[in-house]
Amino acid sequence: MQKIVIEGGHKLKGEVKISGAKNAALPCLFASLLTDQVCEFRNIPRLRDINTTLQLLAEFGVSHQVGRRMSINPVSVKHVRASYELVKTMRASVLALGPLLARTGRAEVSLPGGCAIGARPINLHLEALKKMGASIEIKEGYVLAKAKKLHGAKINFDDVTVTGTENIMMAAALANGETVLENAAREPEIVDLANCLRSAGVEIEGDGSATIHIQGRKNLGGITHEIIPDRIEMGTFMIAAAMTGSDFVISGGRMDHIEALVGKLDEVGVELIEVEKGIRVKAPKAIRYTDMSTAPYPGFATDFQAQFMALMTLASGSSVIVENIFENRFMHVAELNRMGANIKVEGNSAFVTGVKKLSGAPVMASDLRASAALVLAGLAADGITEIHRIYHLDRGYDRIEHKLRKLGARIKRTKVKF
Ligand code: EPZ
């Protein structure tokens, strides 16, 4: 096991480059199952979840080559079973369901099970696939799906679901006829998957809006696609600047993907200046307080909630943070309080009273974005912070301590001695 050790209180400076988006790369890699042609991807980030996805593709008999580009060779899909051993480490494995079913007529995907932030059901995915002609059986913890040939359908999601929208977009790409998705997710990663499918010849309209039209095709060409930059990584670094009183440049990101966060950072006094190399982020002398509540895109992303809460722990007043997407996404609160924060939770609201300083402490990561919040708090705190169970962090941040060290942070990864 490893831990990250941070000596806080150092300002950051220089420039950091944002990697490819985890939540765009995952669906795009699974989309390669839809074609028997070689697929080429650029800007795939180096993450545990990417490795897990490549392992899953290998389980299906699909090989890959990594170089400046990543190529996937889905010429034949020999197996259709996504095992519990892999799926339990990455819930997004559920994204294999739609493509496997559409390509081969069968799929056996372990139910992902819950995770730290919630039960994470996939009922909306399964109901939609049934509407497209799939027969779905749940047996011994696996989803057994069958469909001679999927047909297009009009699907209105009861709740906005990101991977649900993505699963059905991929299934629809090879279905007979048109599929219309209503109340679809609108994230930039949805648009990126649509562009990825377009490169293989799929006709799609409305991605990025709540209504998406997909014309199914008999077969697809090879995908050639460059993954968009990771908006969550970009926002995480912006908050790092704000919490450490820093002024540095973030390159390779897209401001238009994080407008809700940019609005909140403006409210608390963070200066964001477009410069030639990207965005210069300048921390305020004092962090103003503001309330925030999460919502589906283009609202404030739940994936920024933990990091923004870390920022509000140092604000010059009290703020209320409401988590509307997941039922248990406050696991970082207890750990931040151990570092001297003053946060009280009631239901899905967290009441944060700003404090002058945080103090370093040994803390435990519980999920991906909570671990990012603890890194941010450690960078700002006085003294030493040790973050345990950092495999959560490695799932979604590409070499984060390397990037932070380049900005001047005192941060290192060491082995945990038992
Ligand atoms: C995606 O998860 C992201 N993961 C999550 O990012 C992100 O937090 C989430 O969308 C919300 O933006 C990937 O893209 C790989 P949902 P997803 O389906 O698709 C309920 C990270 O940190 N729901 O949009 O699993 C669900 O329980 C991760 O990178 C159902 O009830 O989220 C939740 O309350 C964490 N039934 C809400 O909808 C379903 O069938 C939104 O979930 C599906 C979802």
Image (cartoon, helix red, strand yellow):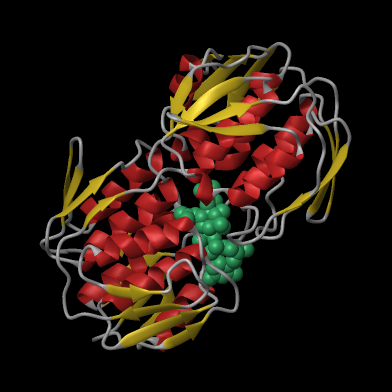
Relative horizontal placement of residue 169, taking residue 163 as reference (left or right):
left
Percent across and percent down for residue 379 are 64, 20
Percent across and percent down for residue 85 are 38, 51
Asked if residue 287 is positioned above or below residue 260 in the image, the reply reads: above
- Tell which quarter ligand 1 is in: bottom right
Query: Looking at the image, which residue is at 53% across and 43% down?
Result: 232
Quick check: can you spot residue 114? no
- Number of numbered callouts drawn: 0
Percent across and percent down for residue 125 are 46, 73
Identify which residue, 399 or 243, lies in the foreground.
243
Quick check: can you spot residue 170? yes
Percent across and percent down for residue 36 are 13, 65
Asked if residue 143 is positioned above or below residue 132 in the image, the reply reads: above
Query: Looking at the image, which residue is at 60% across and 24% down?
Result: 387
Image quarter where the C terminus lies is: top right
Q: Residue 65 lies in what quarter of the image? A: top left
Query: Looking at the image, which residue is at 81% across and 43% down?
Result: 290
Q: Residue 271 lies in what quarter of the image? A: top right
Asked if residue 239 is positioned above or below residue 87 in the image, the reply reads: above
Identify which residue, 343 or 10, lies in the foreground.
10
Identify which residue, 414 or 102, lies in the foreground.
102
Relative horizontal placement of residue 375, taking residue 361 as reference (left or right):
left
Relative horizontal placement of residue 259, taking residue 58 as reference (left or right):
right
Query: Looking at the image, which residue is at 22% across and 73% down?
Result: 103
